Amino acid sequence: MVELLDMNASQQQAAYLYGLWNRLSGQHVALGCSCTMSGMSVTLEDFEHDIADYLWSESERLGQTHVVAFLLAPGPIASQDRAIRGILTRLEEEYVPDAVTEWLLPRMTKTIESYAKLHGPAPEAPLLGGSSSWRKGYRD
């Protein structure tokens, strides 16, 4: 892992988003939580492919060939395990052209922070301490 002081702004943003996404995932697992809609259970990992698929299709639609190549470098989105975490790890640890980071990071930031705001606890909410302690940490 790259030292924080040695990271550029894009790498630091990727590390922040990775940490936020992992925190959301950890809280869901720790609480045995999954979202249900119409009797279907959806986990955080299910959202990873949806978000990555959106980024891929949007980059293709807008002619962002460098972004498309970056997203598909590990293989088709559908076959990428933990796609969002993989993208963020690569953004944090590898050299990635500015054109790719400038296109991906704002979209990923908006998506992940929006997900956290609507679906997760506030960053200062405790991971452990019982449901009432965790519930108090939810955003307004």
Image (cartoon, rainbow, N blue to C red):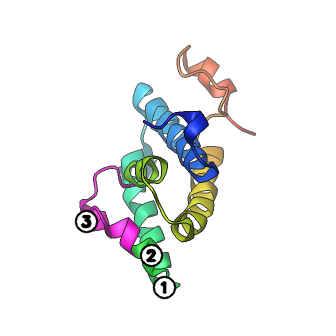
Q: Position of residue 57 (x, y in %)?
A: 43, 77
Q: Which residues are magenta?
A: 69-83
Q: Comparing marks 2 and 3, which lies closer to the viewer? A: 2
Quarter the C terminus occupies: top right
Disc 3: which residue: 75
Residue depicted at 59% across the width and 53% down the height? 10
Relative to 121, is 13 above or below?
A: below
Residue depicted at 60% across the width and 24% down the height? 134
Mark linked to residue 61: 1
Looking at the image, is mark 2 or mark 3 earlier in the sequence? 2
Q: Residues within 10 Å of mark 3 (few under 14, many from 20)?
A: few
In the rendered structure, the answer to whether residue 103 lies left or right of residue 30 reads right
Q: Position of residue 15 (x, y in %)?
A: 53, 42
Relative to 75, is 94 above or below?
A: above
- Of residues 77 and 3, the one drawn nearer to the viewer in this rendering: 3
> Label 2 amino acid?
His
Q: Comparing marks 1 and 2, which lies closer to the viewer? A: 2
> Label 1 amino acid?
Arg
Residue 137 sits inside the magenta stretch: no
Q: Residues within 10 Å of mark 2 (few under 14, many from 20)?
A: some
In the rendered structure, the answer to whether residue 67 lies left or right of residue 78 reads right
Mark linked to residue 24: none
Disc 2: which residue: 66
Relative to 133, is 76 above or below?
A: below
